Structures are given as C-alpha cells and as structure tokens.
Image: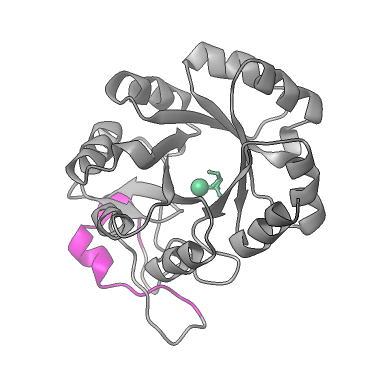
C-alpha cells in the first residue's frame, strides 16, 4: 500500500512549511504530512526548512540566534495576500489533533548541531499525545540512533548519496524505514528493502510519470509537493 505525504505541506502550490500549506494538504485527503524543524535560541522548536530565515521570510539570521518571539515577528515571503508566519512545532501539533494525518517530522540537524533537539521534539509530541501518528526522520544518522533509544515511534533514516545500500543502512541504525532521494533509488534496491520488511518512502516525487513509476514499484510513501496530483494517480491504480 502506497501512501502520499505532502512535502512541507502542499508546497508546490502554497508557501512551504506554513499552516496554509498544511491545511491545504489536509484538504487533498493525503495520508501524511512532512515538515522540517529547527531549534531557536531560547530552545523552542520551529517549522522551517533552512538553518536561516533569509530565503523564506522578510528577516535575516540563523534560527539558532533568534528567539521564538523574534521569529514570530517575521512574515513568510510569498505572492499570497494572506500573511503567513513561521509556525512553532507546538502550533502544528495542536492543529494536527483536528485531523488524522500521519506526521513526518524531519529534524534538520544534519548541517547544524542542536543540543537535545531529539528529546525536545519527542517531549512535545508526548505533550500533545500524538505518539501514534508520528514518523521521525533525519539525515543525521547519529540522531536516528538517539531517536530509536528515546521513542517507540517510527524513525526513518534519510539519505541522498549514491552507493548506499538502504538495507544495510537501516539495519546498522536499527531504523524502521528509509526515506531516500528518488535519484539514488533503484527498483532492485527497493525490492531488497521490501524483502527485509523495510518501508521505503521517496522524495521529492513531483512529476506524474515519476510518481506513476514508483507507485507501480509498490513504494510505501510518495513524498511530494503536489499531494493532490499524487492522490489522483494513486486512486487511478
Ligand atoms: O524528508 C524528505 C525531504 O524533505 C528531505 O529533503 O531538503 O526537502 O528537507 P528536504
Ligand atoms: Ca524535509
């Protein structure tokens, strides 16, 4: 069974990692939502892809050097009239209680080290009692090991480099699933994973022919900027 995950929300159509993009994703009826988290200067968790606010907002600076209050004063750059802000993880988790989507939280701690990010995120999920609907993922494979020790939620190892054997990677980290860049996956590697009971979700599948190809291969998750499109292709099958 293949499931569709909205990558940074419905980010092909709406500003990425915003409540607007998340709510639009939910309306598509997709199974899951993927988003990225970083830690602020005052040890809060915010939902944003980059290490800095420069690309996506009207502000400047690294998340690690800004407080939640400072971040909340910024606006997301977009052509939309509605002014979006960077959501906190708490806000997103609170909203998530109103629906049934699976939530894939990607910890963005591969390029930057955030002391205790794993514990903080796991605690927030517990506070909101959403443990049953969470998949954690990260490119930081030491962090995968930490998450596996502190939570019983699914933990996926992310990777994007060629030449990695996903079965060995998952086994070496005790990871529950593999989230891979579609460019480094092959049908044979996917079958190897399937034979070992390792779910494979691929990002970022945006083109219809590409989505169709991997649906035909029976992948576990389509991580896409266009969940509506992926849902339609999936339903046609
Ligand atoms: O989680 C899959 C995908 O989101 C990883 O890459 O850069 O879009 O966060 P990126
Ligand atoms: Ca991501």
Judged left or right of residue 220, residue 218 is: right
Horizontal placement of 213 versus 162: left or right? right
Q: Place residue 12 in its image quadrant.
A: bottom right
Residue 171 appears in the figure: yes
Magenta part of the chain: 61-78
Task: Return the x and y of residue 178 as percentages of the image width and height.
Answer: 57, 29
Residue in the picture at 77% in, 36% down: 217
Give the quadrant of the N terminus: top right
116 on left or right of 18? left
Residue 206 vs residue 3, the one in the foreground: 3
Q: Residue at position x 47%, y 15% from top?
A: 174
> Is residue 68 one of those drawn in magenta?
yes
Report x, y in % for residue 98: 31, 60
- Single out the residue that lies furthest toward the bottom: 81
Q: Is residue 165 visible?
A: no
Relative to 107, say whether 225 is above or below. Answer: below
- Rendered residue at 73%/43% (across/down): 215
Number of disc labels: 0
Vertical position of residue 1 compared to residue 11: above or below: above
Residue 106, by quadrant, is top left
Residue 49, position as x, y percentages in the image? 46, 53
- The answer to which of 236 and 91 lies nearer the viewer is 236
């Amino acid at each position: 069974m293949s499931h569709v995950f909205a990558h940074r929300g419905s980010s092909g159509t709406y500003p990425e990692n915003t409540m607007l993009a998340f709510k639009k994703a939910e309306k598509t009826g997709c199974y899951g939502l993927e988003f990225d988290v970083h830690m602020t200067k005052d040890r809060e968790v915010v939902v944003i892809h980059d290490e800095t606010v420069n690309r996506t907002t009207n502000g400047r600076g690294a998340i690690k050097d800004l407080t939640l209050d400072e971040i909340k004063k910024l606006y997301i750059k977009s052509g939309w009239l509605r002014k979006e802000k960077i959501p906190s993880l708490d806000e997103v988790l609170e909203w998530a209680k109103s629906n049934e989507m699976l939530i894939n939280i990607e910890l963005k701690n591969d390029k930057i080290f955030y002391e205790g990010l794993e514990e903080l995120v796991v605690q927030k999920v517990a506070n909101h009692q959403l443990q049953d609907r969470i998949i954690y993922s990260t490119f930081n494979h030491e962090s995968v090991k930490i998450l596996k020790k502190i939570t019983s939620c699914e933990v996926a190892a992310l990777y994007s480099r060629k030449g990695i054997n996903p079965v060995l990677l998952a086994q070496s980290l005790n990871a529950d699933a593999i989230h891979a860049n579609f460019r480094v996956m092959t049908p044979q590697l996917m079958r190897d994973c399937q034979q070992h009971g390792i779910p494979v979700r691929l990002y970022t599948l945006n083109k219809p022919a590409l989505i169709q190809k991997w649906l035909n291969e029976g992948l576990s998750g389509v991580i896409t900027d266009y969940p509506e499109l992926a849902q339609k292709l999936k339903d046609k099958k």
